């Protein structure tokens, strides 16, 4: 049994000291719970499942400020010194932390510390890699305490062949024709270049669960595929991963729309409006709970949103945007238009873009509001 002794604060006490003491009590309590939970894999999973949403509620990043800077500040507030954060690739990042002034950092507490830090890193890693992550934590007690955390994106991305074998009954399977190979290659290439989270994350509240957002968008896009083109690609290549399904549907709808001579932004706008209805039915109609605080608080007639460079196109650094290679990006901006117009009751119109340069990490998207 754990007993905590709390200091009694007076009105003349320092607010900063009170906040620090509160964090110390919180972290120390979580550490004790983690030490007990680390004794079995089931308890460890349950602990992580509880802690991750708690930490995500504590940390909500602001738009327009370096996420690394915000995470460093947040980790310092939790008691860690010398936070070093590096994004190594689209699916991997590394965080190195120094001593923590709030935790009991002993060799005998290693398993509990690793579980606690793993849970915290899984909570905040999503903001570095824009998807769910797993965390590998290593502690070094040689000289002081050094935490080295490796973050890896968690994705289920079966190959097209595996997916078809899973979704098509064995009695109806046929050998793939030579003509189908280019399409499979094209989808595989798209998986490595397009980040479907950028179709909605830059405008939606960061507290909304990403997995649910993918499911909602998948369902809306499937309805459009059936109603507009009498075909749903998920019937052939659908998976258990809604993120991957959104990617398949994006490629399908964009290609069909281009072939029909229609504007992909117009299609995106229509999908965005139905996606907004699905959001309101699932999470409630309060705009404050659905959209980023910056959008809610702004009263300007021009809005700028930043998206990850080259996340909605197949461009390489230095390539120029053209109408043909910007089709998916225009589709995404149409979704922004539809979602924002429906939820706020104002008219959002995508009017301009500022493509990222060779070393830039963001593209800027301009919207006029009436």
Image (cartoon, rainbow, N blue to C red):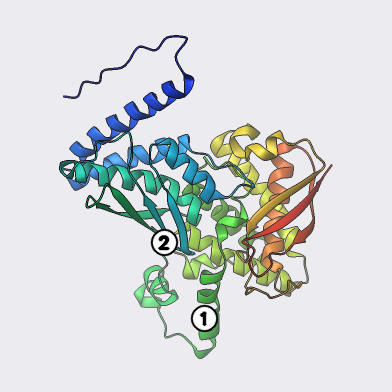
Which residue is pictured at 58% across the width and 33% down the height?
A: 284
SS assignment at label 2: loop
In percent of width and height, residue 247 lies at 55, 64
* Mark pair 2, 1: CA separation: 19 Å
Q: Nearer the viewer, residue 38 or 189?
A: 38
The image quadrant where one finds the C terminus is top right
**Toward which corner of the image does residue 154 lie, by quadrant?**
bottom left
In percent of width and height, residue 56 lies at 45, 39
SS assignment at label 1: helix
Which residue is pictured at 30% across the width and 50% down the height?
A: 146
Crowdedness of circle 2 by 10 Å Cα count: few (<14), some, many (20+)?
A: few
Which residue is pictured at 44% across the width and 46% down the height?
A: 124
Instruction: Tell me the tag on residue 155.
Output: 2
Q: Is residue 75 above or below residue 366?
A: above
Q: Nearer the viewer, residue 208 or 134?
A: 134
In percent of width and height, residue 245 lies at 51, 62
Which residue corresponds to mark 1? 185
Foreground tag (2 vs 1): 2
Q: Residue furthest bottom?
A: 178
């Amino acid at each position: 049994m754990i007993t905590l002794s709390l200091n009694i604060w007076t009105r003349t006490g320092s607010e900063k000291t009170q906040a620090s003491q509160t964090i110390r009590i919180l972290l120390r309590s979580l550490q004790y719970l983690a030490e007990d939970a680390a004794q079995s894999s089931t308890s460890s999973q349950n602990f992580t499942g509880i802690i991750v949403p708690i930490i995500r509620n504590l940390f909500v990043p602001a738009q327009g400020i370096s996420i690394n800077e915000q995470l460093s500040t947040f980790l310092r507030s939790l008691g860690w010194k010398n936070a070093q954060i590096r994004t190594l690739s689209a699916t991997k990042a590394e965080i190195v932390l120094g001593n923590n002034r709030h935790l009991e950092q002993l060799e005998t507490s290693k398993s509990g510390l690793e579980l606690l830090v793993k849970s915290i890193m899984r909570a905040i890693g999503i903001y570095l890699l824009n998807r769910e992550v797993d965390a590998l934590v290593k502690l070094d007690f040689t000289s002081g305490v050094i935490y080295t955390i490796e973050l890896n994106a968690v994705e289920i991305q079966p190959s097209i062949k595996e997916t078809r074998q899973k979704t098509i009954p064995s009695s109806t399977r046929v050998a793939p024709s030579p003509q189908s190979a280019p399409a499979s290659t094209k989808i595989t290439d798209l998986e490595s270049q397009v980040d479907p989270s950028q179709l909605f994350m830059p405008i939606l509240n960061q507290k909304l669960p990403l997995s649910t957002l993918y499911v909602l968008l998948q369902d809306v896009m499937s309805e459009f595929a059936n109603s507009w083109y009498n075909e749903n690609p998920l019937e052939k290549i659908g998976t258990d991963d809604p993120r991957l399904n959104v990617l398949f549907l994006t490629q399908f709808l964009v290609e069909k729309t281009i072939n029909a001579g229609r504007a992909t932004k117009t299609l995106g706008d229509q999908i965005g409006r139905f996606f907004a209805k699905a959001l309101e039915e699932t999470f409630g109609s309060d705009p404050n709970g659905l959209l980023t605080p910056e959008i809610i608080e702004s009263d300007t007639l021009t809005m700028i949103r930043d998206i990850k460079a080259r996340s909605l196109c197949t461009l390489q650094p230095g390539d120029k945007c053209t109408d043909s290679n910007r089709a998916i990006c225009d589709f995404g901006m149409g979704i922004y238009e539809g979602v924002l117009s429906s939820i706020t009751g104002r008219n959002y119109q995508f009017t301009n873009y500022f493509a990222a340069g060779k070393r830039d990490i963001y593209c800027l998207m301009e919207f006029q509001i009436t």
